[in-house]
Structures are given as C-alpha cells and as structure tokens.
Image (cartoon, rainbow, N blue to C red):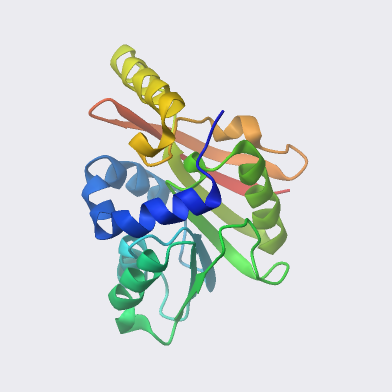
Amino acid sequence: MQTLTHEQARQFYDRFGARQDNQRWYEDRPIAALLDQLDFSGAERLLEFGVGTGRLAEKLLHHELPSSCHYVGIDASATMIALADDRLEPWFDRVRLIQSDGTIQLDLDDGSRDHIISTYVLDLLSEEDIRQFLREAHRVLTPTGRCGLVGLTWGEEPISRGVMGVWSAVHSLSPRLVGGCRPLRLEELLDPNEWTLVDRRVVTCWGLASEAVVLSPR
C-alpha cells in the first residue's frame, strides 16, 4: 500500500503543527485505554516515538511518571520538536528531545528503556518501517519492559467498519488527505519470536476505530 515518504510526512507535520491537538476528539479515549493498561510506577527511562506537540508527554510527566523518570522524545518534524520543547520546559532537567531524519533508527543503547510508547505514528509508516521500528524497540527495551502503541485500526461494528473502509479508500487515493494514516492491525506485523501481545483494546469514537496495544519482549 502506498504511504507517505519520510520527507513527505515531515513536511506535512511541519505544516500541520499545533493543529494536531485538534484530533484529541478521537485520540484521547484510545490513549486513555492504553495508559490504563500500563504501569508506570517503576518507570525510570521512557521513550516516546513521535512526540508530536508534546501533549501526551506533558500528561505523563505531570500525572503518570515518577519524579525520577527521564523522558526521551523523538520526532522527524522540526515544528513538533519546537512545540514540544516549549510545552515540556517545566521538566527540562528530565527531558531530552531528538529530531530524527525520518529513518527508523533509535540512537539509544541496547536495553536502555523500560517503557516505549508511540501513538498515531505507526499507522502512517510503511509495513517495512513498522517492522524496523518493532525490531529497534525490541533492542532498546529491557527484558521486563513494555511497549505501548495506539493507532487506527479496522472497525468491529457495522458503522465503524464502514467509516474505516471509507478512510482506507481515501488513503489509497491520496495519503495526504488523511495525514498519511490508515487502519492497521498491528498484531499481524509482530514477530512472534520477539514479542508477546499482552493486551489489545479497540476504542471507537464517532465511527473512527483505534487499537491500544501493549507488548512485552520475548
């Protein structure tokens, strides 16, 4: 399936900027479902792949993460990095933001993160890039770590199946019209030798279906 190139995605989200927060009407409930599944009480080193405007990072640092936890956020968009940098300034001593070149390579040591999260990012990547991210996530997670992912998925009820079918059709015509994102079922892309699916929940908001997935490394 056609997807945006790394450069096209970067340009799109550079232009989109703070308007990304307007998508919270369908993103907040699936992300809340993910956070309900994750235990951050012992988190010390968290990575967010696709920091966006920093809205989720702000929530995590303010309400979820221990005060000793250090946060690393990666994004390919200079605009998003700038927005997140301003938003996360109160935690400047615990936050490191990295602007990537769009390639799926995590510049982090093996086993250096106990939590990895990524929301509404993998669904705009090619299947090859998703598999590369999962390999990298497996490499940098501790053996007892958790990887939490949220993205668009196929609907499970007639209305949401119809809505997501239309969304997928629009994406096939022009990925830019839907921000590059399309419905996926991440379980189908997992290497069973590397990952165990701990939990998967589908949350639908006004016909838009998202999956909240928690993985543990094997």
Picture quadrant of residue 106: bottom right
Q: Is residue 167 above or below residue 68?
A: above
The residue closer to the viewer here, 134 or 17, is 17
Picture quadrant of residue 125: top right
Q: How many marks?
A: 0
The residue closer to the viewer here, 27 or 168, is 168
Residue 28 placement (x, y as % from top left): 28, 47
Outermost residue on the right side: it is 193
Q: Is residue 153 left or right of residue 47?
A: left
Q: Is residue 160 above or below residue 152?
A: above
Q: Is residue 62 above or below residue 136?
A: below
Q: Is residue 103 left or right of residue 39?
A: right
**Residue sitting at x 30%, y 62%:** 55
Residue 117 placement (x, y as % from top left): 49, 56
Q: Is residue 191 visible?
A: yes
**Residue sitting at x 27%, y 39%:** 26
Q: Is residue 7 left or right of residue 112?
A: left
**Residue sitting at x 56%, y 28%:** 1
Q: Is residue 156 visible?
A: no
Residue 111 placement (x, y as % from top left): 70, 67
